[in-house]
Amino acid sequence: MSENICGNCTACCTVMAVDEINKPPRCKCSAECDAGCSIYQDRPDQCRGFHCLWRMGLYDFSPEEYLFNLNYVGENFWLDCELKNIEKRPDICGFLSHTCEDGGDIYVIIRPIHPVDAKILEQEKQFIKNYMPVIKDVLIEEIEK
């Protein structure tokens, strides 16, 4: 897997909380600008160390690899197999997925950026569970209404 570049995606800047600058979750960061981040060179360590699964390159495989990896999962995934890597970028697909650790166990949290069809989130959860078997569990964060 290769690492992707964020480009103009700022999904994590809105969805994630950043304690170092007292930014609550699900609020636009005051440093967010048209170019991405106005304090990028001096951004908080929490931001510097954050990498979503798209940025880490989880979705960087060819359609043949998707079919090989997902063939046993079921027909619901065949549509996802056709998606290009860029379509899984958080600002395009509508959710941000990342890992976290708790007591030595690794989890993945799927955080919708805006309301996303529950079927899509469940498909993503199953994809991650099948593709990343070392994950203890995949949690889907609910958006407060």
Image (cartoon, rainbow, N blue to C red):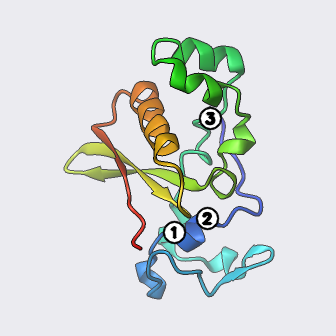
Vertical position of residue 82 compared to residue 108: above or below: above
Q: Position of residue 51 (x, y in %)?
A: 54, 54
The residue that mark 1 highlights is 15
Q: Position of residue 92 (x, y in %)?
A: 69, 53
- At 69% across and 46% down in the image, what residue appears? 4
Q: CA distance from mark 1 to mark 3?
A: 20 Å
Q: CA distance from mark 1 to mark 2?
A: 6 Å
Vertical position of residue 36 compared to residue 119: above or below: below
As shown in the figure, which amino acid type bears the numbered disc 1?
Answer: Val
The N terminus, quarter of image: top right
Q: Earlier in the sequence, mark 2 or mark 3?
A: 2
The image quadrant of residue 133 is: top left
Asked if the residue at tag 2 contacts the one at tag 1, i.e. Cβ–Cβ closer than 8 Å, the answer is yes
Numbered label tally: 3
- At 59% across and 82% down in the image, what residue appears? 29
Which element is circle 2 on? helix
Q: Position of residue 128 (x, y in %)?
A: 45, 34
Q: Position of residue 115 (x, y in %)?
A: 53, 61
- At 68% across and 75% down in the image, what residue appears? 41
Q: Between residues 67 and 65, which one lies in front from this camera angle? A: 67
The residue that mark 3 highlights is 59
The C terminus, quarter of image: bottom left
Number of the label disc, if any, that sits on residue 11? 2
Q: Residues within 10 Å of mark 1 (few under 14, many from 20)?
A: many
As shown in the figure, which amino acid type bears the numbered disc 2?
Answer: Ala
Q: Residues within 10 Å of mark 2 (few under 14, many from 20)?
A: many
Whether residue 65 sits left or right of residue 76 in the image: it is: right
As shown in the figure, which amino acid type bears the numbered disc 3?
Answer: Tyr
Q: CA distance from mark 2 to mark 3?
A: 17 Å
Which residue occupies the extreme right position in the image? Answer: 35
Vertical position of residue 86 compared to residue 126: above or below: below
